[in-house]
Image: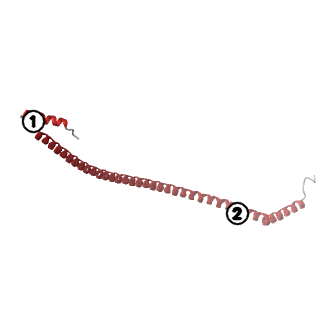
């Protein structure tokens, strides 16, 4: 039984050695271990804070991006509207110029028609005069006895003469 029950001296020296070991471990190992654990806790806490800050910044950036996108859409819509207005303005100016040009050409054509009409009328007058002279000449060459013969002769002459 001696082996199973320890002696008082053994318990005393074991306790003293245990306390000395605790003291040495407390000074040499526990403080650095506690420092490292605290450092690690602090770095984890800092990382969490940075992640929260990054999350907040992402929200702000997202809000800014949405704002910028909305402004870009508005700017695009304004540019498209301005482009349409300019296009409509150019088209209306082109139409106005085309109408002016058509009117100018129309007036020139009407003037040309009037000039040609006057020329044709002058030619017709000259031909009528020539025909009248030719008819009068032939009428005068013949001696006519009565009115019936005169009308017959004029009708025959008119049939013979070709109108140009």
Report whether 82 appears left or right of 143: right
For label 1, the SS is: helix
Please give the count of numbered marks on the rendered protein. Answer: 2
What distance separates the C-alpha of mark 2 from that of mark 1? 146 Å
* Mark 1 lies on residue: 150
- The image position of residue 75, as x and y in percent, is 45, 56
- The image position of residue 64, as x and y in percent, is 51, 58
Q: Is residue 42 above or below residue 130?
A: below
In the depicted view, which residue is nearer to us: 60 or 88?
Answer: 88
- The image position of residue 31, as x and y in percent, is 75, 65
Tag on residue 122? none
Q: Identify the residue at horizontal 72%, vertical 61% (top origin).
A: 37
Report whether 98 appears left or right of 19: left
For label 2, the SS is: helix
Q: Nearer the viewer, mark 2 or mark 1?
A: 1
User: Can you tell which quarter of the image residue 33 is in?
Assistant: bottom right
Q: Identify the residue at horizontal 54%, vertical 55% (top origin).
A: 62
In the depicted view, which residue is nearer to us: 6 or 140?
Answer: 140
> Does the CB distance between marks 2 and 1 fall below 8 Å?
no
Report whether 55 appears left or right of 5: left
Q: Is residue 129 above or below residue 149?
A: below
User: Can you tell which quarter of the image residue 128 is in?
Assistant: top left
* Mark 2 lies on residue: 39
Q: Quadrant of the C terminus?
A: top left
Tell me the crowding category of disc 2: few under 14, some 14 to 19, or many 20 or more residues within 10 angstroms, Cα based. Answer: few
């Amino acid at each position: 039984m001696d082996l199973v029950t320890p002696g008082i001296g053994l318990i005393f020296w074991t306790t003293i050695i245990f306390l000395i070991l605790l003291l040495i471990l407390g000074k040499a190992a526990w403080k650095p271990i506690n420092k490292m654990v605290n450092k690690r806790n602090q770095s984890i806490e800092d990382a969490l804070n940075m992640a929260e800050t990054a999350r907040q910044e992402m929200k702000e950036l997202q809000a800014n991006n949405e704002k910028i996108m909305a402004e870009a859409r508005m700017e695009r819509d304004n540019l498209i509207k301005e482009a349409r207005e300019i296009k409509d303005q150019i088209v209306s100016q082109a139409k106005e110029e085309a109408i002016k040009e058509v009117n100018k050409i129309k007036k020139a054509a009407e003037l040309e028609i009037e000039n040609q009409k006057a020329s044709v009328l002058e030619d017709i007058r000259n031909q009528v005069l020539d025909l009248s002279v030719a008819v009068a000449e032939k009428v005068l060459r013949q001696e006519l006895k009565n009115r019936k013969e005169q009308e017959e002769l004029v009708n025959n002459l008119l049939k013979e003469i070709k109108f140009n």
